[in-house]
Amino acid sequence: MNSLKTALMVLAGVLIVGFAVSLINADQLSRRLQTVQYEFLIADKELQRVSSERDTLADVNSFLLAREYTVDELMLRVDSLQARMRENELRNSYYGHYLLIDTRQNRFHLRRSFGNGEDILIRSGYCGTGKGWTSNDSGAVWNFSTPRGLRYVVKIGENPYWYRPDWYWQEMNLTPPEPDEYVVIPDTLSWDDQIVYYRDSLSAEERIWVQKVPGVLGEYKIDLGGGILIHYGVGRGRNISHGCIRMGSADLEALYRALPVGAPVIIY
């Protein structure tokens, strides 16, 4: 009987100790759970903050992109408005032919003003204008935009040569030739024969080294100063040139016949 009582007391003690240990473990788990919950709340707030910053940066980026687009559009509208104002001035003060160049739609409009506020459209069509910023494989950058604003015809001429500019070699990723490495077309040949010589007597590689190139600008040129010419060229209707204004052969001849030195050219 005593031994049974002793065994029950031992069992009760073990149960009590076990229960106490369980209570302690439960308390520790509860504290740990509270700590984890607190850390989760902290992490969740941090995640929300980072997410908010990301969304804010995304919104700012979108705003800046929209602003850049808006500024570009605004500048185009300002250029167009200034062009219209100058056109109105020409109608009241200038007698003769003048030219409008739209670099956005790549169109030209040859008009004739009568100096009394009236003018008429003579000819209209597509042209090619500057392609803007461009670069080569080595990272060199150029701005080949057609300059906007009011310009005047400073010179006209027939059978113009194209002289390869210094940037040509860089843009083509070529080493500029030494002076004695240029291929020269004989000056004793007529203009037409020089063109035939360039196209038929030289290989494609040799043509690259001709500095004074006949024929590629067409039969006429209209010089607006600052290296900007109106000449023949492909790619009309696009922003494709290195700043000059490209015309078809028939349109170029019509402009050449109509625009004297001093004629206004409005580019917008």
Image (cartoon, rainbow, N blue to C red):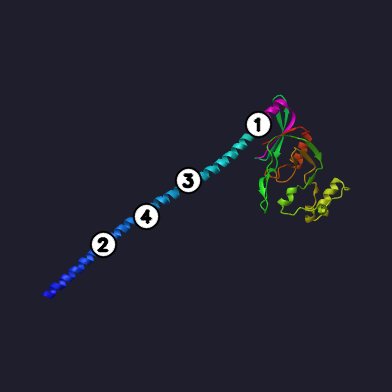
Give the alpha-carbon distance from disc 2 to disc 4, as whole Å: 22 Å
Picture quadrant of residue 10: bottom left
Horizontally, is 214 left or right of 171 in the view?
right
- Find disc 3 in the rendering and name its residue: 56
- Find disc 1 in the rendering and name its residue: 84
- Find disc 4 in the rendering and name its residue: 39
Three-letter amino acid code at the position of disc 1: Arg
Three-letter amino acid code at the position of disc 2: Ile
Give the alpha-carbon distance from disc 3 to disc 2, as whole Å: 47 Å
Task: Decide which of tag 3 and tag 4 comes sooner along the chain.
Answer: 4
Viewer-side residue, 248 vs 209: 209
Q: Position of residue 188 (x, y in %)?
A: 89, 48
Q: Residues within 10 Å of mark 1 (few under 14, many from 20)?
A: some
Which mark, by number, is residue 75?
A: none
Three-letter amino acid code at the position of disc 3: Thr
Task: Decide which of tag 2 and tag 4 comes sooner along the chain.
Answer: 2
- Find disc 2 in the rendering and name its residue: 24
Q: Residues within 10 Å of mark 2 (few under 14, many from 20)?
A: few
Give the alpha-carbon distance from disc 1 to disc 3, as whole Å: 41 Å
Q: Position of residue 253 (x, y in %)?
A: 78, 39
Is the residue under label 4 in contact with that under label 1 (CB below 8 Å)? no
What secondary structure is marked by label 1?
helix
